[in-house]
């Protein structure tokens, strides 16, 4: 199996993605109907615009279907498992403790090193309480998840 190199671009047209994966555009359109995570944006002229994340997912789908010989249904389930595993790994590696910069007055809760002088801002670690009274709604979570994916995609493009 040959390694596919994805060009460093924000968006890819359907023809570019089809050439990259060595499949026909109608196969990509079919996969969009079978795999709900593939949702390309559309230009004003109606042309599909795939993000890098979409292309990476399409490469994985092709591997599952053509090389690992999964059925469409099996590939859909396996892809969900992979996404769930990936999200689990992200939350395990990313700390959920936000840093807050204090102004001129150091906080008693702050973490300060002996190297900082009185005029430099001090960094405090603020822990989230486990009994949060505000739980984001399902719609808010979906919006935030999409925003997170878009920001991650942009960050990947900048690397």
Image: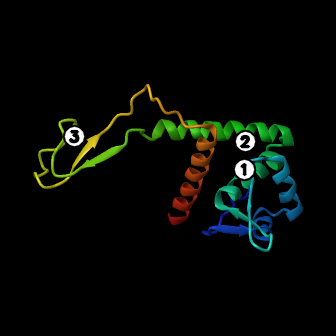
Q: Where does label 2 land, which residue?
A: 79
Label 1 Cα neighbours within 10 Å, binned few <14 / some 14-19 / many ≥20 = some
Look at the numbered discs 3 and 1 and tell me whether their residues touch, using CB distance below 8 Å.
no
At x 44% / y 25%, what residue is drawn?
131
> x, y percentage for residue 48?
77, 66
Which residue of the protein is positioned furthest toward the front in this rendering? 133
> x, y percentage for residue 14?
79, 67
Label 2 Cα neighbours within 10 Å, binned few <14 / some 14-19 / many ≥20 = some
At x 63% / y 44%, what residue is drawn?
142
Pick whichever of labels 3 and 1 is earlier in the sequence. Answer: 1
Pick whichever of labels 2 and 1 is earlier in the sequence. Answer: 1
Pick whichever of labels 2 and 3 is earlier in the sequence. Answer: 2
At x 72% / y 50%, what residue is drawn?
60
Label 3 Cα neighbours within 10 Å, binned few <14 / some 14-19 / many ≥20 = few
Q: Where does label 3 land, which residue?
A: 111
| Mark-to-mark CA distance, 2 and 1 | 8 Å
The N terminus, quarter of image: bottom right
Q: Where does label 1 land, which residue?
A: 60
Q: Is residue 158 visible?
A: yes
């Amino acid at each position: 199996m040959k390694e596919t190199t994805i060009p460093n671009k924000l968006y890819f047209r359907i023809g570019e993605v089809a050439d990259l994966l060595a499949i026909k555009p109608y196969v990509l359109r079919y996969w969009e109907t079978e795999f709900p995570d593939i949702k390309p944006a559309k230009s004003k002229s109606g042309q599909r615009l795939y993000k890098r994340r979409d292309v990476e997912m399409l490469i994985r789908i092709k591997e599952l279907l053509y090389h690992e010989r999964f059925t469409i249904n099996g590939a859909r389930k396996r892809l969900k498992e992979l996404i769930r595993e990936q999200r689990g790994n992200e939350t395990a590696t990313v700390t959920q403790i936000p840093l807050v910069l204090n102004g001129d007055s150091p906080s008693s809760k702050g973490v300060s090193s002996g190297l900082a002088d009185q005029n430099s801002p001090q960094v405090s670690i603020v822990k989230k309480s486990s009994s949060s009274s505000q739980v984001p709604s399902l719609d808010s979570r979906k919006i935030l998840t999409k925003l997170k994916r878009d920001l991650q995609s942009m960050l990947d493009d900048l690397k």
